[in-house]
Amino acid sequence: MAFLEIDHVSKYFPSHTGDGQVCIFKDVTIKIDKGEFVTTIGHSGCGKTTLLNIIAGLETMSEGGIILSGKEVSGPGLDRMVVFQTFSLMPWMTVFQNIRLAVKAAYPDWDREKIATHVHKYVDLVGLKGSETKRPTALSGGMKQRVGLARAFSIEPKVLLLDEPFAQIDALTRGVIQEELIQMWNTTRNTVFMVTHDVDEAILLSDRIMLMTNGPSARIAEIVDVTIPRPRSRETVIEHPHYYKIRNHIIHFLVRHAKHGTGGDGGPPDQPVSEAPLEVNFERDSLMLR
Amino acid sequence: MSGGRGNPWLISGFLLVVFLLAWHFFTLRAAFDPRGLTEDQLQMMEFNGDIDRTADGGYVWNPEKEKVKGVPGPLAVLDKARIELGEAFVKKGTNDHGIAYLVLYTVSRFAAGFLAASVVAIMLGVLLGLNKVLFRAVNPYIQILKPISPLAWMPLLLYTVKDPKWTAVLVVFMAALWPTLATTAFGVNSLRKDYLHVAAILQLSWFKRLYKVILPGAAPTIVNGLRISFGSALVAVVPAEMLLGELGVGYLSWIEWNNLDISGVIFAILVVGVVGVILDSGFNKLAGLVTYQE
Ligand SMILES: Nc1ncnc2c1ncn2[C@@H]1O[C@H](COP(=O)(O)OP(=O)(O)OP(=O)(O)O)[C@@H](O)[C@H]1O
Ligand SMILES: [Mg+2]
């Protein structure tokens, strides 16, 4: 049985007009193995954050279920930590206090000293030694998200949920933090579910990439295997023969779906939405490229 | 224009001197001039108490009557202040306590009402801020009750609690309640969802959620509400004392008016101002401790 199983999850919101409901996405199904890094890409508004929040337990699903290591997920918990797009550090706490809040919550019976050591370990890991007593206001966007990552890793969750973690960070810093993330993930091997707009970021970090069609009634149309061996780095990854194949494939998919409201390859909008996602693997089959 | 150069203290001091001099000269009355008055007229005026005969046979305005003629000048007020401050710690009778006692009574009355109102308003505000349905249900009543002048409650409060001492505290309480309540509810309600999400993931107990996340997160907004409450409570305490006859600086101003001692009234006004400034700066110090920048 898979480690994290998302089974026919659908989400409806009440429509703006009052009566009836809008389907945001329907029948999202994927099995994620322990230690796997899975990324979802889709256009803005297709429901990526909603899906991530449902996995986190911060939002309820309308249909379906999620099973994490054999247990059904209901509500938020310390086994699924989110790294937020907006960092979500408490601005009234210092860097140290922000991470300590999480560590204290995760390990309630540790003593002060053990907690402090643990916090310092993760502060060092993201290269923020010396900034422990600073407040988030005094940090750059990149440093804030480093704190967010340190806080998430520090509670050693079963699943790490990253919601466009680098979207608000300038391109140069983004590359650096992406590599730091790879290094941290290499040592911990958490299961990661990430949402992003950035195709290069997705290829660099992921094992599999889920491609989501546009909403309403979005669905997972394809799941692309990133057939590039690890360890990866930003320089080496682009030299792999599959890199541009995967990249072009994803970009073509996104361009095809850029027109709002079309559910698939220009087909009728009311085509059956529950059809299983196409599995794309360039190693197995190079004919997938259209 | 040099635009922002110069010492503001110097300008403040200059303005004060200009004001005091203007005050002094506009309230100055010419010395009594007996020329053109017959002996009979002078005797009549002395008999009426308008003028006094001095030892050397001349006449001056009667200083007792001068006190209520026109507005007293700064020197008269200074004189009054010297006397009042000289006996600041003297209790002459049940209703005649030194100024230090009066300030103490007003400040403690104010503090009791303000603190009680703040605690109640913050607790209710957090409750309403966390529960949208409850907030919507209660909000119309808050909107109706908020604009009512706290003094308007006084007859009802006096009738209900009977005791003027507690009525004065309750008037301050009513004055301080609504602004804090409304802003706390708003601040908690508009707290970034992310913070509550973090608290939910970390499975913080409701108590920890309250004092680690909700209260500090809403603190800047709550402090703004407290500041408004503070001002409105300070404004309410003076007339409450006047109307209820409770000893305090507001009462002082009223009693001096009854004594027709205008210098005393001006002195009382100044004391109210000074007490306000001191309380306000104390409040700002506290506020600075709990607010943060986004
Ligand atoms: N509480 C809500 N009530 C009604 N509709 C909502 C609610 N939350 C989100 N939606 C709608 O659901 C859709 C998906 O939102 P979501 O934030 O998940 O998109 P997203 O894919 O993360 O977009 P982005 O890439 O811009 O972050 C949007 O159309 C949004 O308007
Ligand atoms: Mg989003």
Image (spheres, rainbow, N blue to C red):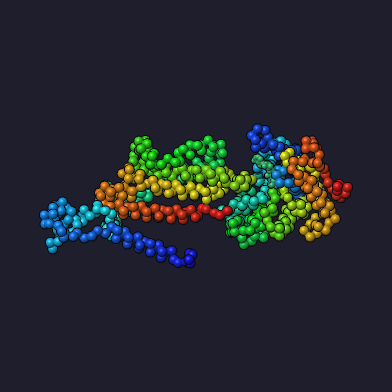
**For residue B70, above or below residue B1:** above
- Say which residue appears at 82% left-offset and 49% top-offset: A249
Residue A153 vs residue B248, the one in the foreground: B248
- Say which residue appears at 73% left-offset and 41% top-offset: A215
Q: Give coordinates of residue A212: x percent, y percent.
A: 76, 44
- Say which residue appears at 57% left-offset and 46% top-offset: B191
Q: Is residue A19 left or right of residue B271?
A: right
Q: Quadrant location of ligand 1?
A: top right
Quadrant in which residue A62 is drawn: top right
Q: Is residue B10 left or right of residue B211?
A: left
Q: Give coordinates of residue A238: x percent, y percent.
A: 81, 57
Q: How many marks?
A: 0
Q: Give coordinates of residue B57: x percent, y percent.
A: 12, 61
**For residue B176, above or below residue B156:** below
Residue A24 vs residue B33, the one in the foreground: B33
**For residue B3, above or below residue B288:** below
Q: Give coordinates of residue B267: x percent, y percent.
A: 31, 54
- Say which residue appears at 49% left-offset and 49% top-offset: B224
Can residue B151 be seen in the rendering of this structure? yes
Q: Is residue A148 left or right of residue A254?
A: left
Q: Residue furthest top?
A: A19
Can residue A180 be seen in the rendering of this structure? no
Q: Residue furthest front?
A: B36
